[in-house]
Image (cartoon, rainbow, N blue to C red):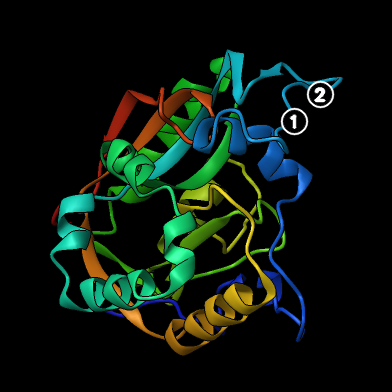
Amino acid sequence: MKFCDDTVMGYDASRRVFSPGEALTFDDAYRLAHLPLVAPGHPEIISTKDGTDYRHGRYETPRHSLVVPVDAGQLGRSDTFRQFEAELRSFSFSQKIAWELGDERAGKLHATIVGGLSVPDIARCVEAAASALAPLGELSLRVGGPFLGRINSGRIYLPVYPCCHDSEDVFGLVQQACGARLTRFYVIGYYHFAAALTVAETADLAGLAERWRRRVLAELPVTSLAVMATNDDLALSGRVVATIPAGQLA
């Protein structure tokens, strides 16, 4: 089975590079959508924002997305993933990671394929995705080393590299079938900082990310896609409203 790599995916173009002397602080997107849930009471929280329905990190109207679920148990059984996390925990900045939040989210891990689905579009997208997946046969994905982006600066993501079908990104085929934008970008929001980092801590984090960025942390089967509804961007309230089987023998 062949997998997409960084010559195909969009991660390198969106990766944040820290300059010497720079410290990781929280951007407005993280302060509004994530920090209220990661560290309630933090002084930098943005509780509300005009033009949005965010209230302390949650919103009244659920958002719907087509996602690929990620099995936290299978990921945690990967020797390489365990080696990476052991090194992550060895740094002093790891005390600023909300580890308990990771445990709470273990059953909700996912990478988004098509975001912002309107309720009337869900059935059409499910049908289109099922049709796109039917001829593909068994599917897998690779979970890559840490990705630090320019948006939601308090999160450490794990990038997903899907397998290819006739040299095409299989999740891209699903996006096209659903009439969605081709992103080449599927990330798992995995670790969350509850406090900003010092310059020294940021340098340690940047070095860790650089050492591991080309590593494959795990290779996992893709057995289904799902439409997830959530009332918060950490998917703490996430629930599956539709399941699309994948990875069947063609």
Quadrant of the snapshot with the C terminus: bottom left
- Callout 2, which amino acid? Lys
* Observer able to see residue 46: yes
Residue 162 in picture, x, y percent from top left: 38, 66
Picture residue at 59% right of the left edge, 51% below the top: 195
> Which of these two is toward me, 9 or 147?
147
Residue at the disc numbered 2: 49
Picture residue at 68% right of the left edge, 65% below the top: 24
Picture residue at 62% right of the left edge, 58% below the top: 183
Quadrant of the snapshot with the N terminus: bottom left
> Which of these two is toward me, 26 or 10?
26
* Up/down of 160 relative to 107, above or below: below
**What is the count of numbered marks?**
2
Residue at the disc numbered 1: 46
Residue 214 in picture, x, y percent from top left: 44, 86
Q: Are marks 2 and 1 in contact (CB under 8 Å)?
A: yes
- Callout 1, which amino acid? Ile
> Which of these two is toward me, 8 or 43?
43
Front of the two marks 2 and 1: 1
